[in-house]
């Protein structure tokens, strides 16, 4: 199964500087998170950030925060425990009038927003906040994709253990470039050159 930009949302988990200073390969991870968010914006994929205990750990870097439509401040390790799942699902609108009883050709077209159930997740720490968020999104019946080169932990062992556990639970493990080219699908896409510049 390939990612579809029209069905995707991007979650960036806890890239706060006080945390990142202790993260394995932090510079590369943060650079890939920024690329992912820029690509998502080019592809009109919604971007949501989370911040763990921002009063103590600070906010996400301005270059990440500026690319997020919304940022969820949380104390729970899983963003889902703080309402992230509700942010990811469009509000259900009650049916108006008796439109269902009308013949199809007289019914107004539905303006229900498209459900974007493919959740692309990246962040830190991979074995704590990212893992718990991803597993709970999976429990909530989202399709979850974790971007391995935009995730890390304080130690390589913890990061790799998180990836093993996520994969065995049914999460798809991908890279920044895999996400970019699956969202594009073709070299003829209007944003191909802009995305290519970000990757190079």
Image: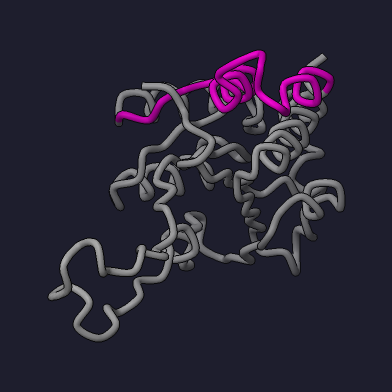
**Quadrant in the rendering for residue 180:** top right
**Quadrant in the rendering for residue 106:** bottom left
Residue 166 in the image, given as x and y percentages of width and height? 39, 30
Colour scheme in the image?
Answer: one colour
Judging depth in this view, the residue of 151 and 179 nearest the camera is 179
Location of the C terminus by quadrant is top right
Q: For the point 66% across and 39% down, which residue is it? A: 40
Judging depth in this view, the residue of 170 and 93 nearest the camera is 93
Residue 170 in the image, given as x and y percentages of width and height? 31, 29
Residue 131 in the image, given as x and y percentages of width and height? 46, 40
Q: For the point 75% across and 58% down, which residue is it? A: 57
Residue located farthest toward the front when viewing the structure as drawn: 105
Against 139, is 53 above or below? Answer: below
Location of the N terminus by quadrant is top left
Residue located farthest toward the bottom when viewing the structure as drawn: 97
Residue 194 in the image, given as x and y percentages of width and height? 80, 26
Q: For the point 27% across and 78% down, which residue is it? A: 95
Judging depth in this view, the residue of 192 and 138 nearest the camera is 192
On whether residue 192 falls in the magenta region, the answer is yes
Would residue 64 be found to the left or right of residue 122 on screen? right
Against 165, is 66 above or below? Answer: below
On whether residue 139 falls in the magenta region, the answer is no
Q: Which residues are magenta?
A: 170-197
Would residue 165 be found to the left or right of residue 58 on screen? left
């Amino acid at each position: 199964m390939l990612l579809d930009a029209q069905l995707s949302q991007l979650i960036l988990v806890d890239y706060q500087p006080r945390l990142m200073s202790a993260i394995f390969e932090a510079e590369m991870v943060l650079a890939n998170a920024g690329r992912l968010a820029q690509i998502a914006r080019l592809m009109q994929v919604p971007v949501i950030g989370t911040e763990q205990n921002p009063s103590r750990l600070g906010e996400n870097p301005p270059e990440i925060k500026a690319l997020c439509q919304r940022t969820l401040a949380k104390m729970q390790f899983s963003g889902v425990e703080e309402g992230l799942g509700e942010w990811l699902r469009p509000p259900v609108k009650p049916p108006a009038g008796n439109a269902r009883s009308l013949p199809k050709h007289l019914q107004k077209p539905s303006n229900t927003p498209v459900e974007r159930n493919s959740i692309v997740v990246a962040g830190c720490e991979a074995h704590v906040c990212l893992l718990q968020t991803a597993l709970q999104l999976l429990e909530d019946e989202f399709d979850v994709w974790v971007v391995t080169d935009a995730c890390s932990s304080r130690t390589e062992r913890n990061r790799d253990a998180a990836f093993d556990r996520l994969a065995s639970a049914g999460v798809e493990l991908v890279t920044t470039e895999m996400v970019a080219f699956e969202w594009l699908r073709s070299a003829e896409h209007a944003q191909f050159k802009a995305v290519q510049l970000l990757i190079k």
